[in-house]
């Protein structure tokens, strides 16, 4: 357990930051799930629209430090390839 005032404050900050990041991750996962569901249903228009909505959310997560840049790029790349293959 934290002993010094500084380490106690850091522990509080970490808890708050964890809660914010957890909410951001959950929000991004929701957008990704909508793309997955649209792909599974076979609706190319809905999948394209969902992917367009998910891309900025993912990149926002990168800029906020929730995801690594390459992770987001990989997810977008794989999802866009699957949407493109729906034809």
Image (cartoon, rainbow, N blue to C red):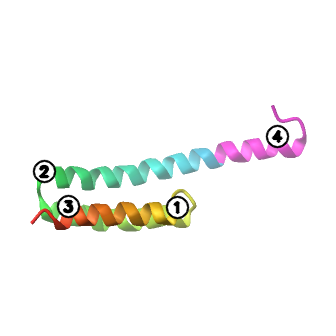
Q: Decide which of tag 2 and tag 1 comes sooner along the chain.
A: 2
Instruction: Decide: few, some or many residues near mark 3? Use Cα within 10 Å; few <14, some 14-19, many ≥20.
Output: many
Q: Compared to 12, does 53 lie above or below?
A: below
Q: Is residue 30 above or below residue 87?
A: above
Residue 10 shown left or right of residue 57 in the figure: right
Q: Which residues are magenta?
A: 1-16
Q: Position of residue 54 (x, y in %)?
A: 34, 62
First reached walking from the N terminus: tag 3 or tag 1? 3
Tell me which residue sits at (49%, 52%) in the image: 24
x%, y% of residue 12?
74, 42
**Residue 41 part of the magenta segment:** no
Quarter residue 45 falls in: bottom left
Residue where numbered disc 1 is placed: 68
Residue 7, picture quadrant: top right
Q: Secondary structure at mark 1?
A: loop
**Is residue 12 found inside the magenta-colored segment of the image?**
yes
Density class for disc 4 (Cα within 10 Å; few <14, some 14-19, many ≥20) is few
| Mark in the foreground, 3 or 4 | 3
From the image, state whether disc 3 or disc 1 is nearer to you. Answer: 1
Q: Nearer the viewer, residue 67 or 85?
A: 85
Counting residues from the N terminus, which is met first, the one under dot 2 or under dot 3? 2
- Percent across and percent down for residue 79 are 28, 61
Secondary structure state at the residue bearing disc 4: helix
Residue placed farthest to the left in the image?
Answer: 87
From the image, tell me which residue sits under label 4.
8
Q: Which residue is mark 3?
A: 47
């Amino acid at each position: 357990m934290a002993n010094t005032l500084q380490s106690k404050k850091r522990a509080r900050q970490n808890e708050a930051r964890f809660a914010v990041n957890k909410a951001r991750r959950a929000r991004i996962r929701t957008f990704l799930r909508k793309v997955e569901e649209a792909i599974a249903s076979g609706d190319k228009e809905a999948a394209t629209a969902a992917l367009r909505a998910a891309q900025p959310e993912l990149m926002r997560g990168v800029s906020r430090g929730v995801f690594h840049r390459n992770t987001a790029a990989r997810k977008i790349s794989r999802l866009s390839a699957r949407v493109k293959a729906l034809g």
